[in-house]
Structure formats: C-alpha cells, structure tokens
Image: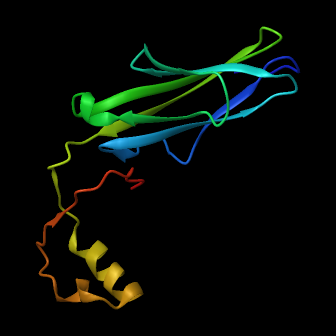
Amino acid sequence: METTSDTPEVGIAKLKEGSQVFGLTSIEASVLDTSEIIKVEFYVDGVLSKTLTSAPFIWDWDSASTPAGNHVIKVVAYNLGGGTSEKSITLKTIPLDKEVVYPNPYIKERARRRKDNYRNLPADSTIRIYSLQAMNC
C-alpha cells in the first residue's frame, strides 16, 4: 500500500503473520500520522468487529467466538484529513482445550536453556496449554 503525507501509517503490533491464538487476544493497531487519527476499525474476516476513536487502539478479540482455523484480521485507520490506511494479517485460532504436542527437540532445547524438568519428559510428551495469551510460534 502506498503512503502519502496525508495518509496514516498503520500496522499490527506484537502479532506475526500466521500466529496461533486462542481465547482473548489483544489486537494492537500501531498508527503514525501527521494529523489527528479520528478512528481505527478492526475487522475479522471482513466483518467490522470494533471501532475505537481514541488511543490506545487496542482491541481484545475473543478468538474463541470464531471457529478454529485461519482468520484475516484487518485494521483500518482514518485521519482528520480524510486519509485512510489498512493492514491485514492472518491468524490461526485454536480451541482452548486443544492438546499441543511439541516434538522432542523442542523439549530438549527448553531443558538445555532453562535446566528445568523438561529434560525428564519422554520423547512423545504432550503438553496441555490453557492460556489466554497469543502463541507466537
């Protein structure tokens, strides 16, 4: 997307393309502009889900309200001069009760770095994760 002096610059902070998320996930729009931002809209799969009119532009998305799978998150920023800009990323939602199986090399690396109880886990270990934070794997 081309940006001009009267168009805001918008990005999505702290999340990477393809990140796995579950539960409440903070979607933060990072906005730079030379004029006043009047609103930021948040979309999930093309459907407007939230509009914020003042900073910080952070929306807590309950990803459990959408089916598991890939979802396109889009933020659109509007400035006082009528300029707009948008940014989209795809996130993958997983159910809160999903078992996430990490391969043995992951467990060994964690043990090597942290010298904790991971080293005693068998190669086919299953780690259950129940969290409300985004997984940036």
At x 77%, y 23%, the residue is 8
Residue 1 vs 32, above or below: the answer is above
Q: Is residue 121 visible?
A: yes
Chosen colour scheme? rainbow
Query: In this rendering, is residue 90 above or below 125?
Result: above
User: Which quarter shows the N terminus?
Assistant: top right
| Foreground residue among 12 and 103 | 12
**Which residue appears farthest toward the bottom when viewing the image?**
115
Could you tell me if residue 18 is visible in this image?
no
Residue drawn at 15 percent across, 82 percent down = 121
The total of numbered circles placed on residues is 0
Q: Position of residue 40 (x, y in %)?
A: 62, 22
Q: Is 67 left, or right, of 53 in this rendering?
A: left
Q: Quadrant of residue 107?
A: bottom left
Looking at the image, the residue that sits furthest to the top is: 82
Looking at the figure, which quarter contains the C terminus?
Answer: bottom left
| Residue 70: x %, y % from top left | 32, 31
Location of residue 91 in the rendering, given as x and y in whole percent from the top left corner? 39, 37
The residue depicted at 80 percent of the width and 13 percent of the height is: 80
Q: Is residue 7 left or right of residue 26?
A: right
Based on the displayed image, in which of its 4 quarters is residue 34 positioned? top right
Residue 101 is situated, as x and y percent measured from the top left of the image, at 18, 61
Which residue is nearer to you in this view: 50 or 124?
50
The quadrant where residue 48 appears: top left
| Residue located at (40% from left, 45% from top) | 19
| Image side of residue 2 versus residue 91, left or right | right
